[in-house]
Amino acid sequence: MTTFWPMLRKEFTQMRRDRLTLAMMVGIPAIQIILFGFAIRTEVRNLPTVVLDESRSEESRRLVATLENTGNFAVVGAVADRTELAEAIDRGRAQAAVVIPPRHAEDLKRGRAAPVQVVVDAADPLSSQAALSGAALAGAALNGTSAGGAAGAAPAGGVDVRVRPWYNPALRSAVYIVPGIVGVLLSMTLVIIMSMSVVRERERGTLEQLVVTPVTKTSLMLGKIVPFVLVGYVQVTVILLLGRLLFDVPIRGSLLLLYAEALAFIVASLAFGLLISTLVRTQAQAIQLGFFYMLPNILLSGFMFPRQAMPEPAQWLGAVLPLTYFLEVLRGILLKGSGIAALWPQTLIMIGFGMVFLALSVRRFAKSVE
């Protein structure tokens, strides 16, 4: 025990001097429990919804209002035809659509069942369940019956609300989760590995040797990124193959477009990892900061929980994560067959993230070696 107390005192002194590590150990768990405790919601509300009202009657307007009153649908606009309806869902502007036939009011007045179709983007099974629940509630409210039955059950002469799931009619969760795993694993491995790169050079004493060579700082940063781009592509290929073979995940869009989009996300992830490596001094700090970045990616990007169910501040945080946009691209190409015309906003945002992170990394690196 005579040697234990000096050693214990030495460790506490060293911990107190390493303020960044101490702050991360205490602050990161506190921030995360507050953030995720408020942000994570499994119930989906206010699905963005477009309306194709071919009846244009008082009865159809009452139907739309009743659907909105369930809280499961939020009407974001009207569409003129089914082509525009499909385009709105493909582009992600809406996750559901209400189709009211031309004879809706006439059927009700004649005492016939009036069918109404609710189309839902079933790539997210939770959204589909919300649509089913909302349709059942709306049908029950309009028909004056109990909401305990199926969504399409309606008495004679009532509104027959039926849900049609697109892209994932069997509501299989693997179809939704497996494409997301591509983005999550890329983000997890590339950010953490790259965040340790410059730190490792500094700890080994080789960083100063690199600095005095004729290599520019930008070339040094790009030289560290490019080899891991190939690693990222290998990961994408492996996950897609296993997802197809083991889980029967569809590939409806262009693989060439998918790999081109993946490049923007891979570069953004590697550039952010480089930025982390210029902010810390030890590999332990790099790992801690990398995991601090990873948890919001998993929980706020839409990988596990629908973003529509989150409070607005949590949605804003998710909007500054490159993974949020890459998941939209992945699910758009694989599950919906979307093309670049529908995905160019997400593409530009990911390219912007990569450029900003790389520029900040070069700027921070110049200061960290002085």
Image (cartoon, rainbow, N blue to C red):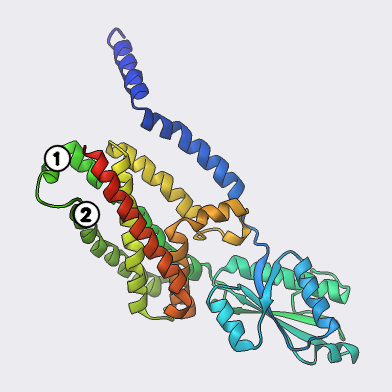
Return the residue at label 1.
208
Q: Is residue 138 above or below residue 311?
A: below
Viewer-nearest residue: 153 or 30: 30
**10 Å neighbourhood of mark 2: few (<14), some, or many (≥20)?**
some
- Left/right of residue 348 with respect to residue 165 in the rendered view: left
Viewer-nearest residue: 80 or 230: 80
- In the image, what residue type sits under mark 2? Thr
Which residue is painted at 35% across and 59% down in the image?
354
Does label 2 or label 1 sit earlier along the sequence?
1
Q: Quadrant of the N terminus?
A: top left
Residue 190 visible to the viewer? no
Q: Is residue 210 above or below residue 357?
A: above
C-alpha gap between disc 2 and disc 1: 16 Å
User: Could you say where residue 305 lies in the image, as x and y percent from the top left?
Assistant: 55, 58
Which residue is painted at 46% across and 70% down in the image?
345
- Left/right of residue 195 with respect to residue 147 in the rendered view: left
Which residue is painted at 34% across and 59% down in the image?
355
User: Could you say where residue 53 lies in the image, as x and y percent from the top left?
Assistant: 73, 84
Quarter residue 212 falls in: top left
Return the residue at label 2.
218
Point out the residue furthest to the top here. Answer: 2
Does dot 1 land on a helix, a strand or a loop?
helix
